[in-house]
Image (spheres, rainbow, N blue to C red):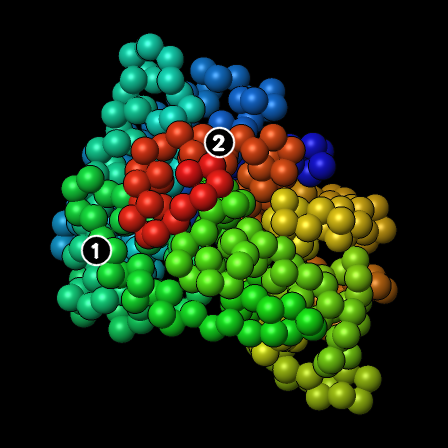
Amino acid sequence: MEKLQHESFSYFLHETNPLNGLVLDKTAADWPASIAATGFALAAYLMAVERGFMPRAAAVERTLTTLRFFWRSPQSREPDATGYRGFYYHFLDMQTRRRAWRCELSTVDSAFLVAGALAAGVYFDADTVDEREIRTLAEVLYERVDWQWAQNHGATVTHGWKPERGFLRYRWEVYDEAMLLYILGLGSPTHPLPESSYAGWTSTYRWENFYGHEYLHAGPLFTHQLSHVWIDFRGIQDAFMRVKGIDYFENSRRATYVQQQYAIDNPLKFAGYGPRCWGITASDGPGPRTIKVDGIKRRFFDYRGRGVPYGPDDGTIAPWAAVTSLPFAPEIVLPAIDYYLHEAKLTESNLYGFKATINPTYPVGSRSPFGWVSPWHYGLNQGPIVLMIENYRTGLLWQLMRNCPCIDRGLRRAGFSGGWL
């Protein structure tokens, strides 16, 4: 695990612009930075110091560079700005540092970025000029975010905004990775979300039963993981979970077991699926293409929000998604890690641990039993690997965020109680 953790962390060492702290979204030519990956990097630096992967002084320097950039970068309605109202564009050019691809101002990716800043603000607690500045910048970056504006006069929070046409029509509704967003928004001392926004979100939940597991459903596995990277939900409950008699951590454990059981059941009869080879989530893939494989017409997708049990499912497996469930169900995740490392040998000849995905069903020219293998690494995959392995081993990030006042305040305003609260 430590080797995988170290190799995955190396992504943030080598795929970051040292002049501004921006982290490459994907290892493809001329690709932009991802603000979410940058947020995960800020937290990964803390783990790296604890593990001896990086000196504290180097982590301070990188963190300070990153936070200074975001604080000083242009915030305006101009189409080539870096952000607006405290939020930031989903993708930024690695060099010019401005909006890339006419993308949206992303509310949830901004939440991951802010969470990384807040974690750094708790961790770097020394009475030095640089570490005091980290704490100050983390605070002011968080306080600048106008969560109320992002509601656009609705009950829930919108996915984002574009200067060309305003707010996106989609909102953060139905259970998904937005738990962190709502908790940060509720905890804001400057522009807090109303408590009704959280109630509006939970009112759209879907409670279902698959393979004998009753749980709060979301198809892609990452939706059961990303907020948990930051917040320890063991033993704390909101109103919804108090009625159900479980917590969100247990919910993610059940979702992990559903993923494994789906792979064992393998209703669409894809190659490779089994008790140690599973993990279906939002990921890239070998498509788009429709071809016949062994006489069966198969439709393969490129990047898609794959999910269980309703799909879409085209035989693409994301090893990183299984790893990120390690704290929830180590008894089934550790054998999967062992399989991916030592039998599938998916880290061989890779700079940063696992490539994003494999598809054993998709026909390729080689004789590899694992079929198509993604040529790419993604920052948004590497961060959860690094941090959830650490949460499993030491609970480092969970403990840091417990000591963050806005997390405590946001959880309480959302109605959470019990456990460590």
Earlier residue among tags 1 and 2: 1
Specify the quadrant of the image occupied by residue 387: top right
For image coordinates 45% across by 51% down, the residue present is: 237
**Residue 138: x, y in percent?**
29, 31
Q: Neighbour class for label 1 at 10 Å: few (<14), some, many (≥20)?
A: some
Q: Amino acid at mark 1?
A: Pro
Which one is nearer the viewer's eye here, 254 or 332? 254
**Residue 169: x, y in percent?**
27, 73
Tell me the tag on residue 194. Answer: 1
Which one is nearer the viewer's eye here, 245 or 278? 245
Specify the quadrant of the image occupied by residue 123: top left
For image coordinates 40% across by 30% down, the residue present is: 403
- Determine contact: label 1, label 2, CB under 8 Å: no
Q: Amino acid at mark 2?
A: Gln
Specify the quadrant of the image occupied by residue 61: top left
Left or right: 121 as drawn, with respect to 272: left
Vertical side of 81 occupied by 68: above or below: above
Vertical side of 341 occupied by 406: above or below: above
**Residue 379: x, y in percent?**
51, 46
Q: Neighbour class for label 2 at 10 Å: few (<14), some, many (≥20)?
A: some
Quarter of the picture holding the N terminus? top right
Badge 1 marks a residue whose secondary structure is: loop
**Spatial CA span between label 1 and label 2:** 26 Å
Vertical side of 346 occupied by 134: above or below: above
For image coordinates 29% across by 17% down, the residue present is: 132
- Find disc 2 in the rendering and name its residue: 399
